[in-house]
Amino acid sequence: MSFLAENWPVLRDAFLTTLSLALLSGLLSLVLGTVLVAMRVSPVAPLRGLATFYVEVFRNTPLTVVFFFLVFGIVQIDLSFPSRFIAAVSALSLYTAAFVAEALRSGINAVPPGQAEAARALGLDFRQTLRQVVLPQAFRTVVPPLGNVWIALAKNTSIAAGFAVSDLTAALTRLSNANADELALVFAAIVVGYLVITLPSAALFRLLERRVAIVR
């Protein structure tokens, strides 16, 4: 245990970096994913096409490739991020937003068509119907899938270690290389760090699912 105590600052900072990556990327991907799904169900064909293109491209592109492009690729066109952390948040957000959009689209499809028809009969336009009637019900329906997307995002933050972001996976590499005899202990500490994020999140989403469940 003395080894963990000696390296506590490294583990603490790595955990906070991973948690920050997950929280910021989760929030941004939720916002972007909501915009994308609104575009996908829009009556405007170009918006539907653009959103569909975005979702299909990012869903079928490895996250590592997205990281590589945002960290090294955009430099070729004279663009760059202020830090690798911001680049990592951007990569995770852009990638995860596609999965959020698909989860929300399944929720929208689960809303009875009569709900939208009733809203239009009351004089609501598309944006009002989507914002006030359809999306609130869709979000309540897709709490479990969104929970799965969030947990996958938390684990996907590990890819940032390969791009000079000092997260938990980077700490694992650093400490195991410097202390080969303590490899098992380092590995266990890093696993616990990820579990501290994912297990409470899973429990929270289960609680939220029960609280907002729609009785049909």
Image (cartoon, helix red, strand yellow):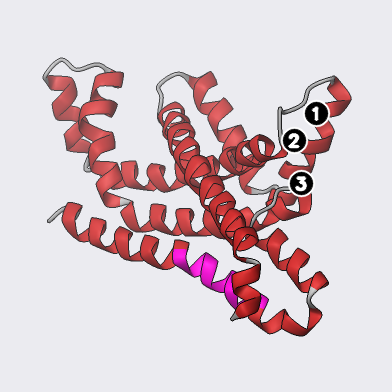
What percent of the width, then of the height, locates residue 40? 46, 31
Q: Mark 1 points at which residue?
A: 74
Magenta segment boundaries in residue numbering: 186-196
Q: Vertical placement of 39 versus 216: above or below?
A: above
* Three-letter amino acid code at the position of disc 3: Val
Mark-to-mark CA distance, 1 and 2: 6 Å
> From the viewer's perspective, is 113 left or right of 167?
left
What percent of the width, then of the height, locates residue 165? 71, 48
Q: Name the mark nearer the viewer: 2 or 3.
A: 2
Q: Name the residue under label 3.
A: 65
Q: Give the residue at x 25% y 58%.
A: 209
Q: Give the residue at x 21% y 43%.
A: 112
Asked if disc 1 and disc 2 are in contact, CB closer than 8 Å, the reply is yes
Q: Name the residue under label 2.
A: 70
Asked if disc 1 and disc 3 are in contact, CB closer than 8 Å, the reply is no
Q: Is residue 187 visible?
A: no
